[in-house]
Image: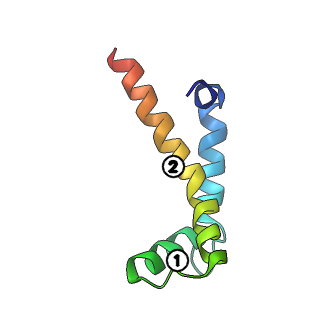
């Protein structure tokens, strides 16, 4: 997980916000795809790819935050 430590927190935060909220109108793709996942209608490969693309930076940010918290606890 050293590669995650080398990514600056600010850069990861900006990427997570931009991709997580894009497009801003009418609703973010990430929110739309999560609603589709909850409804069981996320079946097209392009929709699954879209969910992965928009969610990956957010997941990486959460991993980095957890890693920072773990380091601070030690």
> Measured along the vertical axis of the image, is residue 67 above or below residue 48?
above
Q: Residue at coordinates 65% horizontally, 59% vertically from top-left?
A: 19
> Measured along the vertical axis of the image, is residue 72 above or below residue 31?
above
> Measured along the vertical axis of the image, is residue 56 above or below residue 34?
above
How does the figure colour the protein chain or chains?
A: rainbow
Q: Quadrant of the N terminus?
A: top right
In the foreground, 73 or 25: 73
Measuring from the top left, give residue 65's x and y in whole percent. 45, 35
Q: Residue at coordinates 59% horizontally, 71% vertically from top-left?
A: 48
Give the residue at the far top of this rendering.
74
> Measured along the vertical axis of the image, is residue 8 above or below residue 61?
above
Q: Which residue is denoted by mark 2 in the rendering?
A: 59
Q: Which residue is denoted by mark 1 in the rendering?
A: 32
Dot 1: element:
helix
Q: Residue at coordinates 47% horizontally, 72% vertically from top-left?
A: 34
Measuring from the top left, give residue 42's x and y in whole percent. 51, 80
Dot 2: element:
helix
Q: Residue at coordinates 64% horizontally, 47% vertically from top-left?
A: 14
Residue 23, numbered label? none
Do the residues under discs 1 and 2 have CB atoms within 8 angstroms?
no
Within 10 Å of disc 2 (Cα), the crowding (few <14, some 14-19, many 20+) is: few
Examine the image and state in which quarter residue 39 appears.
bottom left
In the foreground, 3 or 24: 3
Q: How many marks?
A: 2
Query: Disc 1 versus disc 2: distance between alpha carbons?
Result: 17 Å
Measuring from the top left, give residue 68's x and y in whole percent. 45, 27
Within 10 Å of disc 1 (Cα), the crowding (few <14, some 14-19, many 20+) is: some
Measuring from the top left, give residue 74's x and y in whole percent. 34, 14
Q: Earlier in the sequence, mark 1 or mark 2?
A: 1
């Amino acid at each position: 997980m050293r590669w995650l430590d080398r990514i600056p927190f600010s850069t990861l935060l900006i990427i997570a916000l931009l991709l997580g909220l894009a497009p801003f109108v009418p609703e973010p793709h990430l929110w739309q795809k999560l609603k589709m996942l909850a409804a069981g209608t996320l079946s097209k490969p392009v929709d699954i790819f879209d969910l992965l693309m928009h969610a990956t930076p957010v997941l990486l940010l959460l991993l980095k935050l957890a890693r920072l918290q773990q380091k601070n606890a030690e």
